[in-house]
Image (spheres, helix red, strand yellow):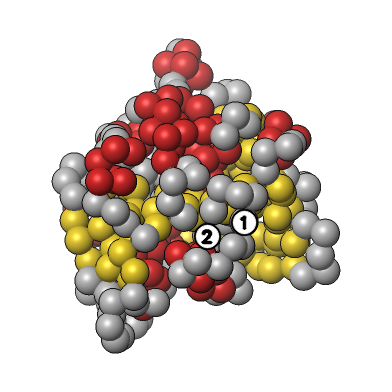
Amino acid sequence: MAYLVLSNGMVFEGRRIGAPGSAVGELVFTTGMVGYLETLTDPSYAGQIVLQTFPLIGNYGVIPADFEGRPALRGYVVRELCDAPSNFRSEGGLDAWLRSQGIPGLMGIDTREVTRVIREEGVMNAVICDEIPADLSPVRDYAVTGVVAEVSRGAREVFPAEGGPQRYRVTLIDYGAKRNIVRSLQRLGCEVTVVPQDTTAEAILAERPDGVMLSNGPGDPAENTACIAELRKLIGRVPVFGICLGHQLAALAMGGQTMKLKYGHRGGNQPVREAGGSRTYITSQNHGYAVVADSLRGVGVETFVNANDGSCEGMAYPGRRCFTVQFHPEACAGPRDTGFLFDRFVRMMGGEELA
């Protein structure tokens, strides 16, 4: 037997999967019914123990072609792990893959009850362990810090346009970028240059890109003061499109504020409504912080709102050629309802005034 011990003292008994050893992290839940591989390889989960609300995980095995990045989560918790995956693309079982990646996990946990606790009390830390610790202060004191630098790539990399002649050159700043952001731009005829998170605005502008993409990523956006300072010099000089953490960093660079949500939005079934419109989209999300839209009055315009809690899901900055969204239009995994935002970015690079 092994245990999931929450920082509030609650104990849940389960069985070991994945790697041996203890793991302390911020415990979060994701509501996706599919896409566990993309979840496990999403760098935005750095520093966190991820709990799947869907009861059966692992039924289609491990498919490396579906990975979105390097796994950065600290632990993994499921109700039931499939021990006989069936998929023609599968290259093995999830338990063995978790072991190979050094990720400790648990199965047999009452994930519905744990989710209920987080929804009522808010996100909290937890530990995966073989013995219940007498002192929970190290668990309570844990904080997700410095994670953007950990997950960002260390060197510049170029990906050519696909499906025809090259139309535009895009620089993607990697704060923990999912691979499908690159693929989405490539399919629209963009050559994508991916650069590390600490690349200066001067270095980016020196290469004269047609547009700049701000990627998703983990942790508290306000912690990334150096990145915010560079974006302050970049926004307004070149078309900019930001996703998730990129959305938050752009808001901070424009003088706005962010806040931590009670338990965040994670999964492929998050409803988002057009601000001032009638359309509602189902989106893929993974974040624990949100932009405070009122803090950007007179600077930006709120474009999307979360249909569940009213939090900000999108901003546009008139006259700055910059727009950002909190959700993931590249999905993977998740619905593709908002993929049109990449087309909007391409049109903005072509000179259309969209924001």
Q: What's the amino acid at mark 1? A: Ala
**Which amino acid is tagged 2?**
His
Residue in view at x 39 percent, y 33 percent: 230
**Badge count:** 2
Q: What label does residue 355 carry, if any?
A: 1
Residue 328 circle label: 2
Nearer-the-camera pick, 39 or 173? 173
Q: Position of residue 282 (x, y in %)?
A: 66, 67
Residue at the image position 52 percent from the left and 33 percent from the top = 253
Question: Sequence-wise, which precedes: disc 1 or disc 2?
Answer: 2
Tell me residue 171's x, y (percent): 32, 55
Residue 353 placement: quadrant: bottom right
Which residue corresponds to the image point at 24% horizontal and 51% vertical from the top-left? 207
Q: Which mark is residue 39?
A: none
Residue 255 visible within the image: yes
Q: Nearer the viewer, residue 14 or 96?
A: 96
> Residue 188, relative to residue 217: is it above or below?
below
Mark 1 to mark 2: distance in Å? 19 Å
Disc 1 crowd rating (10 Å Cα; few below 14, some 14-19, many 20+) is: some
